[in-house]
Image: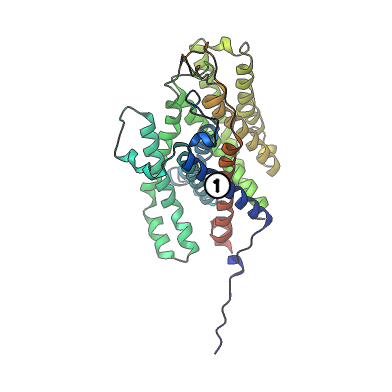
Amino acid sequence: MKMQISVNPRLRFHLSPLVWILLGLMGIAFVVAMIRYIYGIGAISNLSYSYPWGFWISFDLFTGVAIGSGAFVMASIVYIFELKEFQPLLRPSVLTGFLGYVMVVIALLVDLGHPERIWYMMIHWNHTSVLLEIGICVMSYLTVLAIEFAPVVFEGLKWHQFAHTVHKYIMPFVILGVVLSTLHQSSLGSLLLIQPAKLYPLWWTPILPVLFFISAVSIGLAMIIFEASVSSRYFHRGLELHLLEKLGRAIPVVLVIYLIVRFTQLALAGDLQYLFNSGLMSLLFWAEIVLGSIVPLILFSFRKIRQSPNGLLISSIILLVGMILDRFDVSWFAVRHPDPLSYIPSLMAFNAHYIPSLPELSISIGIFSFGILAFGLAARYLPLFDAEEHHK
């Protein structure tokens, strides 16, 4: 008697050229990370005692956390404000947030070294450190995101009873996730309050936590639009244009609030003088303001653009580029580093120079490749786009 086994075509494993490229970039990053762990961070990076924060922190941490903000934005819209019509956008947003935070953790493990000691933070507390609050919030929020995404995994495995149970008790975790995300999105700004003499006046302000949170909301909305637009093209699925149009309608409101708060703070602090006479700093400031706020504010204000798939995608990309530039400015480009011999923390001191090495870049590229590959696998093998699954 012969046994015939049929394989679901959806579950057949196929390596496309893109997958091979992503796997290759991940492999390079893995090798570089192993060299880092064996020979130390100096073997692969251009970081130093006078420049301990570089590309990894700006791109992997500050940018990674920001692009993961779409998860808490969409969870708030669907569960807390009970706008159930946005349900089709929830699962991809939660997955994007989850992968974003996983990538942040991986990058930090490479940056800090000794991944086996990650649990030390939970027993050796420094109660005066903002990093403690950020670390606890990130670890907790990553757990919450895993719980929120668990029903998708359970449904993919046909464990519907487990999925139903998680759905039944999901609300407390959603509320906890929103609180945790709000805390650490803003506390990333609090982390920079310690360097008023090093961060250029156009960026340093005691309300950095407020600016970080407001900008995170705009980034979250733009990231949801970007993810939905790209996935609809790549996976050949429908685009929830009517929902994205409504999200796009909210973006100008958030950006207006952000601009009012930021320029009011500059006026009250007497720092408007730096807007046009600071050379490269003025250029960077206006680049992020124009790209991250003014241009997307104008674009998203037009209904014709909000109702256009290309218009939504291009507008969201412009916003993301501008806001990511802000994260780079505030954590890298606008920070003066002291002379490694004198250690004078002054804007007038000798500025130490730093250019990321190729191995540093390869780590971030490999981690980013992992995120793309993981999202693609989830979209292929799990009911990620639940609205479509339910209509089949």
Q: Residue at x 39, y 32 (%)?
A: 131
* Colouring chosen for the image of the structure: rainbow
Q: Is residue 290 above or below residue 232?
A: above
Q: Position of residue 289 (x, y in %)?
A: 61, 24
Q: Residues within 10 Å of mark 1 (few under 14, many from 20)?
A: few
Which is more toward the observer, 155 or 123?
Answer: 123
Residue 266 higher or lower than 29, as above or below: above
Res 257 seen here: no
Along the viewing direction, whichever of 167 and 44 lies nearer the viewer: 44
Q: Is residue 143 left or right of residue 364?
A: left
In the rendered image, residue 374, in percent from the top left (x then y), is placed at: 55, 52
Image quadrant holding the N terminus, namely: bottom right
The image quarter in which residue 354 lies: top right
In the image, 273: left or right of 309? left
* Number of numbered callouts drawn: 1
Residue 178 point in image, percent of width and height: 42, 40
Residue drawn at x 49%, y 19% is 340
Quarter of the image that includes the C terminus: bottom right
Question: Farthest residue in the front direction?
Answer: 39
- The three-letter amino acid code for the residue at tag 1 is Val
Q: Secondary structure at mark 1?
A: helix
Q: Residue at x 29, y 39 (%)?
A: 123
From the top left corner, tell me how far across and down residue 5 is, in percent.
56, 78
Residue 285 placement: quadrant = top right
Q: Which residue is mark 1?
A: 31
